[in-house]
C-alpha cells in the first residue's frame, strides 16, 4: 500500500547545518601528508607551435620538486581524452586530445608544463619561470568564416574545421510555401563560462606498494572519471578510488574529464608524493569548458490565422579546439526546436565547427535553452508578423495530445501546456500589464512583456537512447539500500549532490517506500569505493527521475524480501502478508504486526526460511522507459530606458510543471537558480575573445559579469502538477528548467518593449550599449533624445 | 623574510611567523586551519572569503595576514555559540538560503555585518548591503528571505526563526 | 592567485613612511586599503619589490572642518565618508559618492587617498576632486586637482611622496552623482556629477578619458541660462574616450550627455 507522508513535504536540508557552519568539506579543504602543489603552465596563445620549453630557471626556484611536460606524461598516460559521439552520427573530425600539449597548442590556456613544489605559493613563482618559446599560428576565431576555404585551420594538420555536419531532417520547401508569412532570423547564443563559485580542483595520492590511486576532486560524476582514468593510467578500477566531496556547484562544467584530472594523478605517480591542484578563477574562466557558443539561422512560417506551418533550423556550434566529452550533446537544440507546438514540418541541420577556443560542453540546459530561445523568439516574430497576441498564437498551436511523437521521433510523455500558461498569465495580470504598457508608451516609457512557454527533455536516460551517445554506457542509474540489524538504513547512489539536496530528498523517497522513519535513513554518494559498481552522476536533470527511481526500486526489493521473511515468521502465506506504514501483518490481524526493523534484525539471526540468504540489502539499476518532459510558462516584465538602453527587469513569473514534487522547497530553489542563470545570459554574461589575438578579454569576475542580488527581482513562482507516466513516482526533472525558460522570456520582453522602434530582435547579452545602438539605428542618426516613432 | 603576526581568531589567540605576501584567507585556511572561509575569485569580487576584522566585513583575499596583526577576526566557525547556530545560520537553513553552500559563509559574514549596522534593513538595503557577494545557485531570492528572517529573530520578534522550522524540519 | 614576494614594512608616521619609500625606491608601493593594489598583485600585473603599510598612521585618518574647507585624511575609509555627519552636512555629494564605491567590504577597507593616488579614470573621487577644485596635499606640497590627474594611473607624485590629505571646498547645495553600470558593484561605465556651488554649477565626468573630466562647457552653458537638456549636449565636447568591453567611445559620449542632464535635473 502506498503511503506518502514524506514525499511532497517541505523537509529542510540535512547538509545545511554543516554548510552554514563552515564545516562543509570542499576539495581545497583536503590535504595529505607530504602533499606537493601543482601549477600548470598554460599557452598564452590561441594557436601556436611549441618550439622549446626551458625549465632551467624554474628548476632552481625554491621548493621545486619536479617539472613535467608532455614527454614525461606520455610515459604514464595512455590514449587520448574521450569524446562521446553523442547525438551526431556523421561525425567527421575529432582531433585527438592528450591532456597536455606536445608540439602544438590549440587554445589559450591549454596545458604545456606542470611544476610541483613544496608549498602553494612556490608553485606559482616557479611556473612563472618556465620559458616556452612559441611560434604563433593563425587562429580560427570567427565562427561565421571558419568554414571558408581560405580560413586558417584550428589544428595545423587538419583538412578543415568541420567537426560534424549532420542533417536530421532535410528541408521540404513545398511545405514552407503553404505559409502566409515567413520570418527569418539569425539568433546568437554567446559563449558562457559556467562559473560555479567553487573552481575545480584535484588531489591525488598514489600508493606504490598497493599500486592504488586515491583521487579527491570536485566532480559531478566520480564513477565516469574513475572509468576514464583506469584506462588512461593502466590501473584497474578496483584500485582507483575517486571521492567527490562537497562540491561548490557544477552546472554541467564538472561532468567531463579535464586535463588536470589526468595530470594530477599522473604527477602523483611520477613523483611518488600526493599532489594537489586548485584552479584559480582566471583558469576557471579560461579553461573550464564553456556553454552555448552557437548561432542559428532560422526560418519559420505560419498561416494568417496563426497556425504554425514549418520551421527550418540550422545550428552552427563552436566546438572549440577539441570536441568536449559531451560537447556534441548540444546539438539536441535541433531536436527540441519545435518546442511546445504542433508544426506541420520541421527541418534541422547541425554543423559543429572547430575553433581555437576552449571546448564547449554541457552548461545548465545544454542545447535545450538554445532550443527554447530560438523557438520562442520565432513564435514572437510570427505573432508580430501577423499582428496576433503572443499568448494567442501559443494557445492556438500547443500540443494537447499525449503521448506526442515529435518530428524527430521523440515521445513527449505528458503535459498540459495551456494550463501552465493560463496560470502564469493570471499571476502576471497579463491583460492589465498590456493596458499599463499602452499607457506607458503614451508617456514615452517602454514596458515589455515576454512570454516563454518551454518544454524540456530530461531524465537521461533510457539505455537504448543514451548508450550510442556515450560510446556504449547507458545513462541508467544505480542504488544500493542496506538495512542494518536495528533497522537503520543506508542508501548509496551513483548520482552526486552538489546543491540539489539529494541527502534530503532521496531519504524522503525511501522513508515512504520502506515506512522507516526519515531520521533513520542516511544517504551516501560521491565515493566510488562505496555502493554499486557503477554510478552515472548528476547532470541533465536526471537524478530524481532516474536515480530516485533506482532508490525506489532497490527499496522495493527490500520490502519484497522482508515480506517473505515476515510470512515465515508469521507462519502465513506470503500473499497474505500486508505491508503498511513500515509494518508487516497478516491480513485481518493488524494488531500483531512487526516493523521492518524487527524483520531486519531477524534477517541477521537464525531460523530463516529454507534457501534464504542472511541480511537485508539490495542493489537496483533503473533503466527508464522514456525521457521525461517537464514544461511551463515564464513571463518577464521589463522597462527599457530608451535613452541609455538600460533594462530594468521588474517582474519575473514562472509556472512550472515537473510532475510530482518530492520536496517543494528544493524544487523552488532549483527554479530560482535556473532562472537567474538564464537571465544572466539574457542580460549580462558573455565570454569575449579578441578576434585578432585570440586572447580572452573576460578572464576575471570584473569582466565576466555574474550578476549580484541587485540585478534580479524576487521571482514569483507557482506550479501545475502533471505526473509523468514514465516512472512510478510520476516525477520529472527540474534542475535546468529555469535556465531553459528564462533567456527567451527576458529577450521577448525586451523586443516587446522596443517594438515601437521597429526593433524585432535583440541578441544576448542585451547590454545597454547593444540596445542603445539598435535604438539609435532605428531612429536614424539622431541622438538628441527625440522619442521614438509610434 | 618572515613577519610575526598575532591575531585573535574567534576568541582564540594565535601567533605565527608568516611571509609578508601571505593572504589573510590563506592564513586562516592553511595556517590557523579554519577552512570555512572560501576563495572564489582573484579580484575581490565574489565575497566568498568575507570575514569580520574588528567587527567590519572584509574580503580576506584582499588583505595580507601581516595587516591583521593585533586584530580580532571572526570567521564562519566563530558564529555558532555553545552549539547553537547563530540566527543567520539558522535562517539560511530555514529559508533554503543555500544550495552548494560554497558562497554561504561569506554571505553569512557579510549579512552579520549588515545587521550590525542596520538591524532592520529593507529589502533594498539587504540587496545593497550584500552587493559584494556572488551566489551562482540560489538566484538570491531565498538569501534575501534568510536575512529578513534572521533580522526578525535577532530583534526578538515572536516569530523566532527556530520555532517554525523545528516543526517543518521533523528532525 | 598568489602575489609575488615583496618586502614589507609598517610605518607609524608620515616621516617614517617617506623614509621607507626612499629606502626601497621606485619599486616600492604604498599599501593603504589595498583594494586596487592587491588584486593587481594577485594577478601579477603589479609586482612591487616592497610595500610600505601606512594603515597604522593614525594622523592620516581624519575629517576636519576648516572654515570653507573640508580636510579629509588620506586614510579615511569609504565607509567613514559615507556615514560621516560632517561630510553629509558640508559636502553631501562626497558622502553619496563614497556609498557608491565598490561594496560594503571594499568600503570598509578602501581609502580616499588610495583612490586618488591610484588615479584610475574610472575612480569616482577624482571626478569630484577635479570638478570642485580640491587640493591634494602630500608630505611635501599641495597640488591642485587639475594638475594632479595627468594621465591614466599617472600623477606628479614622486617615489617617496605620499598623499596625506584631500581638501575639498564646502558645498552643500543641490547635487547628484549618477554612476551608470550594469552590476551594482561595478566601476562606472560612465559617471556624471553635478554640484550647485557659489551660484553656479560644477559638472564632472568619470571614465570618459584617461583622466577625470570637468565639463566646463556645460557649466558655462548653464551659467548663460541654458536648460539642463541643452547644456548637457556640451558634455561630450572634446571627449575622446577609449572603448572597452562595456561601451564604445560613441556610447560613452552619449552617456556623458544623458547622465549629465539627469544629474542636473535630479540634483537635490
Image (cartoon, helix red, strand yellow):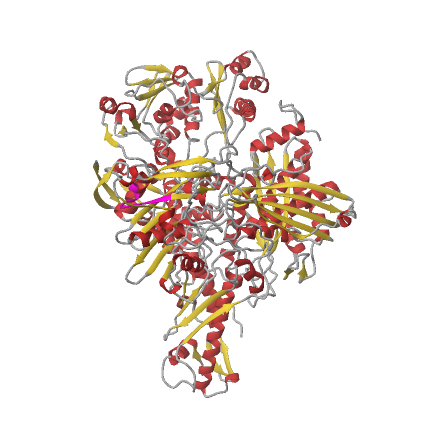
Residue C246 or residue C178, whichever sits in front: C246
Left or right position of C51 against C82:
left
Q: Residue at x 42, y 31 (%)?
A: C101
Residue A116 image position (x, y, % from top left): 31, 46
Residue C246 place in picture, x, y as percent: 51, 31
Residue A114 lies within the magenta run: yes
State the residue in front, A420 or C30. Answer: C30
Residue A250, compared with residue C154, is above or below; it is: below
Snapshot quadrant of residue A771: top right
Start-end of magenta stretch: A113-122
| Residue B128 belongs to the span the image colors magenta | no
Vertical comparison of A413 with A682: above or below:
below
At which x and y percent is residue C241? 50, 22
Residue C82, given in percent of the width and then of the height, sits at 39, 30
**Is A531 positioned to the left or the right of C7 in the image?**
right
- Residue C1 visible to an observer of this rendering: yes
Quarter of the figure with residue C121: top left
- Residue at figure coordinates x 29%, y 20% from the top left: C161
Q: Is residue A267 above or below residue A770?
A: below
Q: How many marks?
A: 0
Given residues A211 and C73, the one toward you in this image is A211
Q: Quadrant of the N terminus of chain C?
A: top left
Amino acid at each position: 500500500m502506498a503511503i506518502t507522508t514524506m514525499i511532497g513535504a517541505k523537509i529542510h536540508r540535512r547538509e545545511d547545518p554543516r554548510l552554514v557552519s563552515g564545516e562543509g568539506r570542499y576539495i581545497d579543504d583536503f590535504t595529505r601528508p607530504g602533499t606537493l602543489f601543482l601549477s600548470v603552465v598554460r599557452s598564452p596563445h590561441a594557436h601556436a607551435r611549441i618550439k622549446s620549453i626551458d625549465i632551467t630557471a624554474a628548476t632552481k626556484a625554491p621548493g621545486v620538486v619536479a617539472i613535467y611536460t608532455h614527454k614525461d606524461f606520455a610515459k604514464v598516460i595512455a590514449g587520448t581524452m574521450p569524446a562521446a559521439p553523442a547525438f551526431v552520427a556523421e561525425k567527421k573530425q575529432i582531433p585527438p586530445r592528450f591532456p597536455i600539449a606536445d608540439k602544438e597548442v590549440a587554445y589559450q590556456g591549454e596545458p604545456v608544463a606542470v611544476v610541483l613544489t613544496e608549498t602553494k605559493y612556490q608553485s606559482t613563482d616557479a611556473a612563472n619561470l618556465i620559458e616556452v618559446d612559441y611560434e604563433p599560428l593563425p587562429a580560427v576565431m570567427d565562427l561565421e568564416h571558419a568554414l571558408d576555404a581560405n580560413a586558417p585551420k584550428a589544428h595545423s594538420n587538419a583538412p578543415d574545421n568541420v567537426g560534424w555536419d549532420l542533417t536530421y531532417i532535410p528541408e521540404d520547401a513545398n511545405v514552407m510555401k503553404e505559409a502566409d508569412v515567413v520570418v527569418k532570423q539569425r539568433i546568437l547564443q554567446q559563449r558562457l563560462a559556467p562559473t560555479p563559485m567553487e573552481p575545480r580542483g584535484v588531489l591525488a595520492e598514489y600508493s606504490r606498494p598497493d599500486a592504488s590511486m586515491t583521487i579527491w576532486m570536485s566532480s559531478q560524476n566520480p564513477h565516469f572519471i574513475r572509468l576514464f582514468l583506469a584506462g588512461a593510467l593502466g590501473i584497474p578500477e578496483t584500485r582507483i578510488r575517486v571521492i567527490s566531496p562537497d562540491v561548490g556547484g557544477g552546472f554541467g562544467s564538472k561532468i567531463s574529464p579535464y586535463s588536470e584530472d589526468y595530470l594530477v594523478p599522473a604527477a602523483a605517480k611520477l613523483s611518488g608524493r600526493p599532489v594537489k591542484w586548485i584552479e584559480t578563477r582566471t583558469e576557471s574562466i579560461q579553461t573550464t569548458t564553456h556553454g552555448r557558443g552557437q548561432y542559428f539561422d532560422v526560418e519559420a512560417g505560419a498561416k494568417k490565422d496563426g497556425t504554425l506551418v514549418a520551421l527550418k533550423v540550422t545550428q552552427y556550434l563552436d566546438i572549440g579546439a577539441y570536441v568536449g566529452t559531451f560537447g556534441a550533446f548540444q546539438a539536441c537544440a535541433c531536436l527540441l526546436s519545435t518546442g511546445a507546438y504542433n508544426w506541420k514540418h520541421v527541418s534541422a541541420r547541425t554543423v559543429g565547427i572547430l575553433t581555437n577556443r576552449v571546448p564547449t560542453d554541457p552548461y545548465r540546459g545544454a542545447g535545450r535553452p538554445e532550443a527554447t530561445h530560438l523557438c520562442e523568439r520565432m513564435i514572437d516574430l510570427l505573432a508580430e508578423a501577423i499582428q496576433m497576441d503572443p499568448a494567442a498564437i501559443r494557445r492556438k498551436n500547443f500540443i494537447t495530445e499525449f503521448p506526442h511523437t515529435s518530428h524527430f521521433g521523440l515521445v513527449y510523455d505528458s503535459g498540459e501546456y495551456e494550463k501552465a500558461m493560463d496560470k502564469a498569465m493570471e499571476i502576471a495580470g497579463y491583460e492589465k500589464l498590456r493596458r499599463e504598457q499602452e499607457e506607458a508608451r503614451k508617456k514615452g516609457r517602454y514596458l515589455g512583456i515576454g512570454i516563454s512557454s518551454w518544454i524540456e527533455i530530461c531524465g537521461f536516460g533510457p539505455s537504448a537512447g543514451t548508450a550510442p551517445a556515450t560510446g556504449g554506457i547507458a545513462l541508467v542509474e544505480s542504488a544500493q539500500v542496506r538495512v542494518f540489524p536495528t533497522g537503520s538504513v543506508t542508501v548509496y547512489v551513483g548520482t552526486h549532490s552538489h546543491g540539489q539536496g539529494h541527502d534530503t530528498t532521496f531519504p524522503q523517497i525511501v522513508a515512504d517506500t520502506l515506512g522507516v522513519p526519515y531520521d533513520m535513513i542516511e544517504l551516501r554518494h560521491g565515493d566510488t569505493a562505496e555502493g554499486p559498481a557503477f554510478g552515472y552522476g548528476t547532470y541533465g536533470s536526471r537524478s530524481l527521475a532516474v536515480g530516485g527511481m533506482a532508490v525506489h526500486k532497490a527499496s522495493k526489493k527490500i520490502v519484497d524480501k522482508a515480506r517473505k521473511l515476515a510470512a515465515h515468521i508469521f507462519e502465513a502465506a506470503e500473499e497474505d502478508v500486508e505491508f503498511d506504514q513500515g509494518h508487516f501483518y497478516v491480513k485481518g490481524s493488524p494488531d500483531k504486526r512487526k516493523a521492518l526493523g524487527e524483520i531486519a534484525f531477524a534477517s541477521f539471526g537464525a531460523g530463516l526460511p529454507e534457501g534464504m540468504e542472511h541480511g537485508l540489502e539490495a542493489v537496483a539499476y533503473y533503466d527508464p522507459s522514456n525521457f521525461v518532459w517537464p514544461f511551463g510558462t515564464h513571463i518577464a516584465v521589463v522597462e527599457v530606458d530608451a535613452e541609455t538602453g538600460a533594462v530594468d527587469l521588474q517582474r519575473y513569473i514562472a509556472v512550472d510543471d515537473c510532475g510530482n514534487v518530492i520536496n517543494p522547497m528544493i524544487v523552488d530553489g532549483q527554479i530560482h537558480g535556473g532562472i537567474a542563470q538564464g537571465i544572466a545570459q539574457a542580460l549580462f554574461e558573455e565570454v569575449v575573445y579578441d578576434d585578432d589575438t585570440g586572447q580572452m578579454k573576460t578572464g576575471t569576475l570584473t569582466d565576466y559579469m555574474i550578476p549580484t542580488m541587485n540585478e534580479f527581482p524576487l521571482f514569483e513562482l507557482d506550479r501545475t502538477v502533471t505526473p509523468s507516466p514514465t516512472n512510478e513516482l510520476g516525477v520529472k526533472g527540474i534542475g535546468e528548467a529555469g535556465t531553459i525558460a528564462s533567456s527567451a522570456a527576458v529577450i521577448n520582453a525586451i523586443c516587446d518593449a522596443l517594438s515601437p522602434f521597429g526593433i524585432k530582435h535583440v541578441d544576448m547579452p542585451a547590454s545597454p550599449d547593444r540596445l542603445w545602438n539598435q535604438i539609435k539605428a532605428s531612429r536614424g542618426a539622431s541622438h538628441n533624445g527625440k522619442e521614438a516613432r509610434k | 623574510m618572515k613577519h610575526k603576526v598575532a591575531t585573535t581568531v574567534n576568541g582564540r589567540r594565535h601567533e605565527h611567523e608568516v611571509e609578508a605576501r601571505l593572504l589573510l584567507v590563506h592564513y586562516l585556511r592553511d595556517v590557523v586551519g579554519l577552512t570555512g572561509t572560501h576563495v572564489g575569485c582573484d579580484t575581490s569580487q565574489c565575497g566568498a572569503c568575507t570575514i569580520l576584522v574588528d567587527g567590519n566585513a572584509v574580503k580576506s583575499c584582499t588583505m595580507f595576514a601581516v595587516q591583521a596583526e593585533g586584530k580580532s577576526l571572526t570567521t564562519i566557525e566563530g558564529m555558532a555559540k555553545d552549539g547553537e547556530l547563530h540566527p543567520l545560520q539558522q535562517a539560511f537553513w530555514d529559508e533554503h538560503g543555500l544550495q552548494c553552500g560554497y558562497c554561504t559563509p561569506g554571505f553569512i559574514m557579510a549579512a552579520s555585518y549588515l545587521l550590525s549596522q542596520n538591524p532592520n534593513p529593507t529589502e533594498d538595503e539587504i540587496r545593497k548591503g550584500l552587493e559584494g557577494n556572488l551566489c551562482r545557485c540560489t538566484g538570491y531570492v531565498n538569501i534575501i528571505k534568510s536575512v529578513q528572517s534572521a533580522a526578525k529573530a535577532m530583534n526578538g520578534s515572536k516569530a523566532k526563526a527556530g520555532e517554525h522550522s523545528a516543526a517543518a524540519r521533523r528532525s | 592567485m598568489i602575489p609575488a614576494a615583496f618586502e614589507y614594512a609598517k610605518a607609524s608616521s608620515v616621516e617614517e613612511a617617506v623614509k621607507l619609500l626612499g629606502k626601497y625606491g621606485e619599486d616600492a608601493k604604498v599599501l593603504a586599503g589595498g583594494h586596487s593594489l592587491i588584486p593587481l598583485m594577485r594577478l601579477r600585473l603589479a609586482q612591487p619589490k616592497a610595500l610600505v603599510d601606512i594603515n597604522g598612521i593614525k594622523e592620516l585618518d581624519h575629517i576636519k572642518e576648516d572654515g570653507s574647507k573640508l580636510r579629509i585624511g588620506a586614510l579615511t575609509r569609504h565607509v567613514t565618508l559615507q556615514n560621516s555627519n560632517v561630510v553629509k552636512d558640508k559636502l553631501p555629494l562626497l558622502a553619496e559618492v563614497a556609498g557608491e564605491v565598490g561594496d560594503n567590504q571594499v568600503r570598509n577597507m578602501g581609502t580616499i587617498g588610495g583612490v586618488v593616488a591610484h588615479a584610475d579614470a574610472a575612480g569616482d573621487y577624482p571626478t569630484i576632486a577635479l570638478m570642485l577644485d580640491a587640493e591634494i596635499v602630500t608630505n611635501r606640497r599641495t597640488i591642485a586637482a587639475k594638475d594632479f590627474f595627468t594621465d591614466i594611473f599617472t600623477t606628479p607624485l614622486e617615489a617617496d611622496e605620499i598623499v596625506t590629505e584631500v581638501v575639498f571646498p564646502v558645498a552643500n547645495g543641490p547635487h547628484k552623482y549618477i554612476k551608470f553600470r550594469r552590476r551594482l558593484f561595478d566601476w562606472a561605465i560612465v559617471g556624471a556629477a553635478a554640484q550647485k556651488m557659489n551660484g553656479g554649477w560644477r559638472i564632472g565626468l568619470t571614465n570618459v578619458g584617461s583622466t577625470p573630466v570637468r565639463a566646463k562647457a556645460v557649466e558655462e552653458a548653464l551659467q548663460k541660462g541654458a536648460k539642463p537638456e541643452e547644456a548637457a549636449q556640451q558634455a561630450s565636447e572634446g571627449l575622446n574616450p577609449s572603448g572597452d568591453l562595456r561601451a564604445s567611445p560613441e556610447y560613452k559620449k552619449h552617456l556623458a550627455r544623458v547622465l549629465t542632464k539627469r544629474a542636473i535635473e535630479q540634483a537635490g
